[in-house]
Image (spheres, helix red, strand yellow):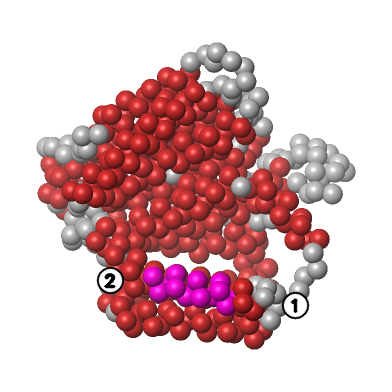
Amino acid sequence: MSPLAPLLTAALLAAVIAALLPDATRHRTPGSLAVWPGVAAAALATLGLAGALAERTDVAGAALALLIVALTVVVQVYASRNLRGDPRARSFFALSLLAALGSTTAIAADDVVLLAVGWTLSTLSVIALIASGGSGPQTRIAVRRSAVALLIGDAALWAAVVVATASTGSISLAALGSLEGTSAALVGALVAIAAIARAGSFPLHGWLPATAATTTPVSALLHAGFVNAGALLLLRFSAVPSDLGPWIAGIAGAITLVVATLAMLTRADVKGRLVHSTAAQMGFLLLACALGAYGLAFVHVIGHALFKASLFLGAGSAVEHALRERALPRPTPSRVGGVVGTAVVLAAAAIAVAASDAFAHPPAALLLFAITTATVAGARIGASSARVSTRAGLLLTLALAVVGYVAVVFPGAEALVPVAGAAVLPWGVTVAVFLIAAASLLAIRSARPLSDRIFAFALAWGRPPLGAPTTPSWASASAGGPLEYRRVS
């Protein structure tokens, strides 16, 4: 445990107390006093990361702690304006800080009991945050689903703690490597279930899409910080000598990656797309951890958290942006430009792979996803109606980014989180997942009957079932039922 961990805990507790203090002025959002102790906590987390980098010990944990605390402060600054006049503001500030406290406690823990205590504190705080979204039917569904799925994951983690402690006679994380046989397999499987539940992945995926009904600050905290903790849990228990856990996490992540990506394409609402995008990203994260690529998973966590927080906090302006785009005439895409953009990105990726020998690394098959995404982006840039000079500059920037990712970030990530003896899935599993995902995306965009079936399946993914009708059959279809099923006239 870092020597700064007690100070970080004290700063977060002070922030919780500040959130509950009565405000001396009515011009301030209730609970927003917590921002200043939160800033102090973020400064301590920054010092903790600097110390970890200097000593080269648990850099990933220190970086994740800073990410969680800093994002909590940023979202609270946003909430001090977004929730002004909202009677739920004070509870948001206090509960979000409790969630951050639980997460940082789990990150800094040296033993399995303290880790589980922090994990459960974070879970309970987030369930309460979701419940603070109101008393409507969607909020009730979200609370019920999140409580069931997340508490199943917590129960699995506590069961793993009991088995590990009883088998090794120690609560230390360092003792996990001495587990053997059935105990090791059971602990690995239980920890995988806990990580799957937190990541909102199959088969415990239903809670994450339901949280689209929560307020924007809560959504930002959920998708930018809370769901990412599954990678940390798998890392902390990576010493367990069991292949069962990585297989469970990898298969669950692969299924979620494919189906959630398809589901994202079926959603017409901004937050719905972002929610399924997060689920797909968490599926990729679990797959990376199952391959032993913990360093790459943590680089992905940090990038995803920063990007998704900005998207959720800017979701309100996305509607205005979409309306402005609809008002503009749609230019004809340039086929030649699309081909040129594709060729530029593929050439840059090929040069980077050849120069860095990236495919010599065990999780190299994951590069298929990154390179394909960059290639699609290059094709869109090249086919756009922007000036030739603008497109050339964007393509050059994208090509350099691809080279940097393949040649620097990808091999360098292994040094960030060195894990010896981590169980690795065969590379063929990742290639199969990539091919299935590519075929599904091509099929759903076609005009064949199979496309309709895939679309219907993806549309229903993670959505609450329709209950018994509460209105007469002759009434308007928009008169009852969950909001996401109603028609907008």
* Bounds of the magenta segment: 391-404
Q: Secondary structure at mark 2?
A: helix
Residue 98 in sight in this render: no
Q: Quadrant of residue 400?
A: bottom left
Query: The residue under label 1 is which amino acid type?
Result: Thr
Seen at 51% across and 34% down, the residue is 76
Q: Main secondary structure of the magenta part?
A: helix
Name the element at disc 1.
loop
Residue 402 inside the magenta-drawn segment: yes
- Farthest residue to the right: give it: 474
> Which of 370 and 143 lies nearest the eye of the viewer?
370
Is any part of residue 33 visible from this angle? yes
> Where 260 sits versus 384, above or below?
above
Residue position marked by numbered label 1 in the rendering: 332
User: Upstream in the sequence, badge 1 or badge 2?
Assistant: 1
Which x, y percent locates residue 456?
A: 65, 61
